[in-house]
Image (cartoon, coloured by chain):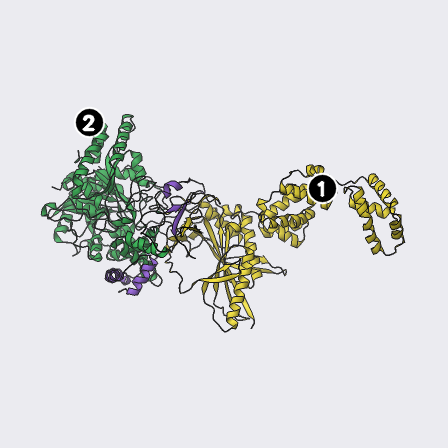
Chain colours: A green, B purple, C yellow
Amino acid sequence: MHNKSVAELSRELESGKISSVELTQQFLDRLKQEDGKYNSFITITEEQALADAKAADEKRAAGKASAWTGVPFAHKDIFCTNGVRTTCGSKMLENFVPPYDATVTEKFRQAGAVCLGKTNMDEFAMGSSNESSYFGAVTNPWGLSTGQKRVPGGSSGGSAAAVAARLVPAATATDTGGSIRQPAALCGVTGLKPTYGRVSRYGMIAFASSLDQGGTMARTAEDNALMLNVMAGFDPKDSTSIDRAVPDYTATLNEPLKGLKIGLPKEYFSDQLSPAMEEQVLNAVKEYEKLGATVKEVSLPNAKLAIAAYYVIAPAEASANLSRFDGVRYGYRCEDPKDLMDMYTRTRAEGFGAEVKRRILVGTYALSHGYYDAYYLKAQKVRRLIQQDFANAFKEVDVLMSPTSPSPAFVQGEKTNDPVTMYLEDIFTIAINLAGLPAMSVPAGFVDGLPVGLQIIGDHFAEARLLNAAHQFQQVTDWHQREPE
Amino acid sequence: MSISREDIEKVAVLARIKVDDEQVSALEKDLGNILDLVDQLSAADTDSVEPMAHPLDAVQRLRPDEVTETNQRDAFQAIAPATEDGLYLVPKVIE
Amino acid sequence: MQWDIVIGLEIHVQLATRTKIFSGSSTAYGAEPNTQANAVDLAMPGTLPVPNENAFRYAVMFGLAVNAEIGRRSMFERKNYFYPDLPKGYQTTQLEQPIVGPGYVDVDLANGETKRIRIHHAHLEEDAGKSLHEDYHGMSGIDLNRAGTPLIEVVTEPDMNSAEEAVAFARKLHSLVTSLGICDGDMSQGSMRFDVNISLKPKGSDQLGTRTETKNLNSFRFMEQAIAHEVERQMDILEDGGRIVQETRLYNGDRDESRSMRTKEEANDYRYFPCPDLLPVVIDDDFIEDARSRLPELPDARKARFKEQYGLNDYDAGLLSGDAKLAAFFEEAAEHGKDAKLAANWIQGEFSARLKAEEKSVAESPITGAQLGDLVVRIADNTVSSAGAKKVFEALWTGENDNVDAIIDAKGLKQVSDTGALEAMVDEVLAGMPDQVAQYQNEEDPKKRKKMLGGFMGPLMKASKGQGNPKLFNEILVKKLGG
């Protein structure tokens, strides 16, 4: 059962061959047995999952089931879950049990899906290797046979590893600079970061508000479509949520790709990319040509500035977003504060990890008196230039394709000493967040036995087209079906 | 661009994060490297460019002025570090 | 040396919306601590702000009332600082593009002149919670019910030159926002709070001096005292050849003293930047016209109408038109009482004195305008004497009875106005006081005669058990005594 997709599990449940309680128990048993190797979960909610499974079976018996009723999955531990600990990978929230649900959480509840627990992540979603989690690093299920533990990517590394290791068929994730796509690529699964505003951010713990977007992770494009069907939609509780009709993303998966115009941004095929990676990505593009697509080179001249702009905007927003973690109303408070200042400074020094503190300090600096124009305002202007580059490209082509990451999964500890080297992991993904565009990572081959991801970028609200392109690719390739040994 | 120890200490106070001398040294190097990366921005010609705060060109919706929330103090204070008589307790606030 | 005083004000006006500016929590005053602080107000992780339409409507109404430009596209910024009563660690406010642009208010001064005070802008922002400094084992308690209450902060140009002008402006603004119904105006509950910027410059100089800001004054009296205090403090320093330090000061009204809160050097670096959780608010013509259609009669127009409609003089009309609730009370009393001038006198006399003595607002008055009007009717038609009317007022106020006529009956306050009965009493009293009658009739001086008349009134009132109409007694006396 653990190798089946959400779509397949849904059909099994529908046919009555298995109940949700049985299915959930199977997944829970496997999860408890296997996750010691990966550390992909922070919290497993066995009791709640079985209760939800029972309710799902009753719902199905009453003829009120939808595609998700009784299907197991997991939430990234950034989505608030009523009554279930939500840590965001931080000591600061080690014991935080929210009395409310994120909108995304609520939507999965209403769909009758069975949440098995909360997946591990970089602390406050800041990282590209899942090594900044207070709850320990996550190990990539791929490459274990080499004897070295590799990173799953980040920040949604727990979700990616769990899906790759067949612990869950699907998991929610979030993406601020590549946090869905890069771990999806490094773990050989399929992930989608929707258009900014497509999925509600309410109850999703904020990192950088103008960049954060909740999204999907599963092995197949079809399952991503099923997830997005649940998650997408206007939310009156999120001012930046867009009031726009949500299509059935599964309805257009089988549209032929003939005539699809693909652009390859020349800046994304530079010398930062190893020849072996490039070969895999170009092979994938050739598959698209076989499916009837046409390919041309395009240019995103300001793309090279994306990392610089991002590392002003994201830390600046984060520095304010994380001020609420002050030890007053919830979360960690230091022992025996001697006065108010002491409470603040020790609570935050002890509650946050090194990378989070670095980013808060960078953001505070960029916004402080005398630097605002040179950093923050300048970054916002560059952000517009980057968005305009994409807008120009989409006048010529339907989608853009590129590698998702510059290299496959690296060994744990390799990049932890140098934050900037780690930041370059997101060199191909970050501009998409600045522009608010939707993009996917789709398994597209292997280098040295490690998965390679193809990034497909669409114009605003082009999720259906991206899912269609990914699904068609997955009809003629089997990279997404490969299983780590 | 480099960042001085004094700047780091000042910023750490603004951000309410306690840093010891050793951390300041490490931060001096790390933040310096990050700011070097960020300094690529200065090369961009942005003279006539409007700053962009949001990825989508949308305008704010306004909410009707209707009470939708009920008292949930017990639930919220159950997860608070210190409360008494319905108040959150903090070390003495001096104006 | 002679000095010019230069004063600018920043006024925080709490808007009378039902809910908070960014959440659906109630703003009702006086609830148990933290029972109106919900997920968004507490800055629970992942929660997001959604702005209240009425906060914008009220701000636009204010803008229209002060002749201001309305910000067609306004934005919210985050102002970053840590304080236990500020849950997010930043205040969501407006900096670059406020909802209300430049405008002005015309203020009537006691010397009869009218002075125009310019408004620099007014912006929307959220209020903070409250720190309670009572001792909780050496700790402070935080109540976040107020956190997120919508405010407009009104910022004036430094156009005022005396405490009197500043207070006149403040009163005018108070009357404006209460008339608009956008603020309950209750200063004791912090609904309006004033920050005063004060500087001095040598008389006639066009160079502004260094200013100080005195924060959080919540009564007109404190404001007047604080200004006087600060002007004197600055004058002392300057005349001793010293320099004024740019700083924020706190004034203690009970002790009439102030102290420095922080200097400019210590001022926080607030790191303002556009709030990424909120989008630009676009105010279109329809929104503005809708707000305009909701504007009630404003104090200036009301004052003119009171003069015209009720025949009040300028002074009375000014006093009664300023506060919307007082104006409504007066109109009700005048309508019921028929005699507007008499109603105005009673409101400014007995009624105001009583409110002041008990520190009550008009809204808290135990008597209604209609009741006072009923009493005015009975005064005007001679049913009660003015001494009797005060007893009726007392009974109404204490809630002894709510009907004017019933009180008059129960207390036997009805004046005897039956001329025949009164004449009989006069005859009887005069018959018993022949010497005084003779003395009166021999007196030539009308003034002295008038005075002597009073000597008969005592025995007459006694004879009538206090119920004789004194005016009629007087007329009869004059007639009987032969002029």
Residue closer to the observer: A93 or A373: A93
Extreme front residue here?
A: C137
- Per the image, the residue denoted by label 2 is A17
* Quadrant holding the C terminus of chain A: top left
Residue closer to the observer: A126 or C317: A126
Residue under mark 1: which chain is it in?
C
Q: Position of residue C177 (x, y in %)?
A: 53, 50
- Three-letter code, disc 2: Lys
Snapshot quadrant of residue C338: top right
Taking the image as shown, residue A450 lies to the left or right of residue C276, namely left
Q: Judge the density around disc 2: few (<14), some (14-19), many (≥20) Cα neighbours within 10 Å.
A: few
Residue under mark 2: which chain is it in?
A
Residue A342 against residue A34 in the figure, above or below: below
Label 2 secondary element: loop
Mark 2 or 1, closer to the camera: 1
Q: Position of residue C44 (x, y in %)?
A: 35, 46
CB atoms at circles 2 and 1 under 8 Å apart?
Answer: no
Taking the image as shown, residue C377 lies to the left or right of residue A251, namely right
Q: Is residue A294 visible?
A: no
Residue closer to the observer: C242 or A5: C242
Snapshot quadrant of residue C388: top right
Q: Are marks 2 and 1 on the same chain?
A: no
* Quadrant holding the N terminus of chain A: top left
- Three-letter code, disc 1: Arg
> What mark, if any, has residue C378 been given in the picture?
1
Residue C169 against residue C147 in the figure, above or below: below
Q: Judge the density around disc 1: few (<14), some (14-19), many (≥20) Cα neighbours within 10 Å.
A: some
